[in-house]
Image: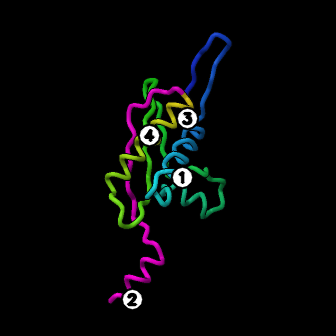
Amino acid sequence: MLETYEVRENGEIKISGDVISVIATVAALSVDGVTKMSGTLTDDLSLKFKIKASDTKGVKVAFIEGALELELFIFVEYGMNVVEIAERVQEAVKESVTMMTDLNITKIDVYVEGITVDKEYHRTALQGR
């Protein structure tokens, strides 16, 4: 996966894109209302054919001209404000990644791929019909 590095007095420091993905995934899933990350087609095919896939599906990392751009693909709990959740994910991810890596983040795009309906809520709604 992509990596970024800095040349320091004592040598290079390299941070793998996988590390960024883990940080972003943990931060996104810590936001109330986010139920899971969505996999990309590549992630889903990797799992289907038992190819080792990253535990960080749902995050794309790009290093562009020394800056970091992220795309996150999430599912949101039914009944929650989707826009508010997406904004909180952006804030949480930016805070965590910046704090842990000192990298400059220029963009965090959040794609809400679906809604997760709690089984109990679904059962109760069906009984009310």
Tell me whether circle 1 and circle 4 mark residues in contact (CB < 8 Å).
Answer: no
Question: Of marks 2 and 1, which one's residue comes earlier in the chain?
Answer: 1
Q: Residues within 10 Å of mark 4 (few under 14, many from 20)?
A: many
* Amino acid residing under circle 1: Lys
| Residue 77 in the image: above or below residue 73 | below
The foreground one among 76 and 61 is: 76
Work out how far the residue at label 3 is from the one at label 2, CA to CA, in angstroms: 50 Å
Is residue 34 rendered magenta in the image?
Answer: no
* Amino acid residing under circle 3: Leu
- Report the residue marked by disc 2: 127
| Front position among marks 3 and 1 | 1
The part of the image, by quadrant, that contains residue 33 is bottom left
Q: Position of residue 35 (x, y in %)?
A: 48, 60
The part of the image, by quadrant, that contains residue 45 is bottom right
Q: Quadrant of the N terminus?
A: top right
- Secondary structure state at the residue bearing disc 1: loop
Residue, x 54% and y 60% (percent of image)?
44
Q: Which residues are magenta?
A: 102-129
Q: Residues within 10 Å of mark 1 (few under 14, many from 20)?
A: many
- Report the residue marked by disc 3: 2
User: Visible in this render: residue 1?
Assistant: no
- Report the residue marked by disc 4: 70
| Front position among marks 4 and 3 | 4
Residue 57: numbered disc: 1
- Please, which colouring scheme is shown? rainbow
- Secondary structure state at the residue bearing disc 4: strand
Work out how far the residue at label 2 is from the one at label 1, CA to CA, in angstroms: 36 Å
Question: Of marks 3 and 2, which one's residue comes earlier in the chain?
Answer: 3
Question: Of marks 2 and 4, which one's residue comes earlier in the chain?
Answer: 4
